[in-house]
Amino acid sequence: MNDDAISAMLQEVNALVDEYRGRCLWFLREDSYSATSDEACRVLGH
């Protein structure tokens, strides 16, 4: 993946985290966002 694709993917994952933080991802801090593709994969694995 190129840097633009990774950046776009991280933005999508972070938007998903915002949407579901209160229901499914309650254990993530309010300021917790994925900064790398590995972190995004861990969040999606939950």
Image (tube, rainbow, N blue to C red):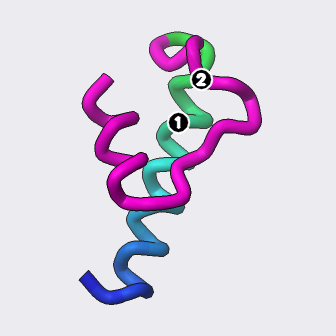
Hey, what amino acid is under mark 2? Leu
* Residue 44 drawn at (x, y percent): 32, 36
Looking at the figure, which quarter contains the C terminus? top left
User: Residue at left 36%, top 59%?
Assistant: 37
The correct choice, above or below, for 29 with respect to 37 in the image is above
Q: Name the residue under label 1.
A: 17
Magenta segment, principal secondary structure?
Answer: loop
Looking at the figure, which quarter contains the N terminus? bottom left
Please say if the residues under marks 1 and 2 sit with CB atoms less than 8 Å apart.
yes
Q: Between residue 34 and residue 16, name the one nearer to us.
A: 34
The correct choice, above or below, for 11 with respect to 38 in the image is below
**Label 1: few (<14), some (14–19) or many (≥20) C-alpha neighbours in 10 Å:** many
Q: Of the numbered discs in the image, which one, if any, rests on residue 25?
A: none
User: Residue at left 48%, top 41%?
Assistant: 16
* Residue 45 drawn at (x, y percent): 26, 30
User: Residue at left 45%, top 72%?
Assistant: 8
Comes first in the chain, label 1 or label 2 = 1
* Residue 38 drawn at (x, y percent): 34, 53
Q: What stretch is highlighted in magenta?
A: 24-46
Hey, what amino acid is under mark 1? Val
User: Residue at left 69%, top 25%?
Assistant: 29
Please name which of the two marks, 1 or 2, marks the residue nearer to the observer: 2
Q: Is residue 2 covered in magenta?
A: no
Q: Of the numbered discs in the image, which one, if any, rests on residue 28?
A: 2
**Label 2: few (<14), some (14–19) or many (≥20) C-alpha neighbours in 10 Å:** some
Side of 22 relative to 38 (left or right)? right
**Picture quadrant of residue 33:** top right
Q: Is mark 2 on a helix, strand or loop?
A: loop
Side of 33 relative to 12 (left or right)? right
